Image (tube, helix red, strand yellow):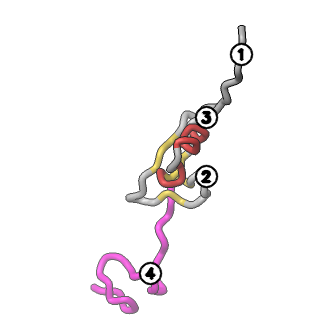
């Protein structure tokens, strides 16, 4: 039987008063938004979750994974 408001059968249209937004089981530690079904994500050793697109640069990925980026200094031994 379709919904009396949005006439959908299994899920409600986002504008329907009976619509319930999806619940995220985890939040991105970078943008703090929810990670929803169908979205790509990664998890670091500390158990933090992040959207794949939030770590789209190598520097961001290294930082998220807990690696320290160092600068080589000229050492004359």
Circle 2 SS class: loop
User: Crowding near pointer 1: few (<14 within 10 Å), some, many (20+)?
Assistant: few
Query: What secondary structure prevails in the magenta region?
Result: loop
Specify which label sits upstream in the sequence, 1 or 2.
2
Residue 16 in the magenta stretch? The answer is: yes
> In the image, which residues are magenta?
1-25
Specify which label sits upstream in the sequence, 4 or 1.
4
x and y, in percent, of residue 2 in the image: 30, 86
Q: Distance between the residues labelled 4 and 2?
A: 27 Å
For discs 4 and 1, the disc positioned in front in the rendered view: 1
Q: Distance between the residues labelled 1 and 2?
A: 36 Å
Residue underneath mark 1: 75
Q: How far apart are marks 2 and 3 (CA)?
A: 13 Å
x and y, in percent, of residue 13 in the image: 40, 82
Q: Distance between the residues labelled 3 and 1?
A: 26 Å
Circle 3 SS class: loop
For discs 1 and 2, the disc positioned in front in the rendered view: 1
Residue drawn at (39%, 80%), measured in percent from left and top?
12
Residues marked 4 and 2 touching at CB (< 8 Å): no
Residues marked 3 and 1 touching at CB (< 8 Å): no
Residue underneath mark 3: 66
Circle 4 SS class: loop
């Amino acid at each position: 039987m379709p919904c009396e408001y949005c006439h959908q059968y299994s899920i409600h249209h986002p504008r329907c008063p009976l619509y319930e937004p999806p619940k995220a089981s985890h939040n991105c530690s970078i943008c703090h938004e929810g990670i929803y079904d169908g979205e790509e994500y990664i998890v670091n050793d500390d158990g933090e979750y992040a959207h794949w697109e939030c770590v789209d640069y190598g520097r961001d990925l290294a930082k998220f994974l807990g690696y320290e980026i160092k600068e080589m200094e000229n050492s004359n031994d």
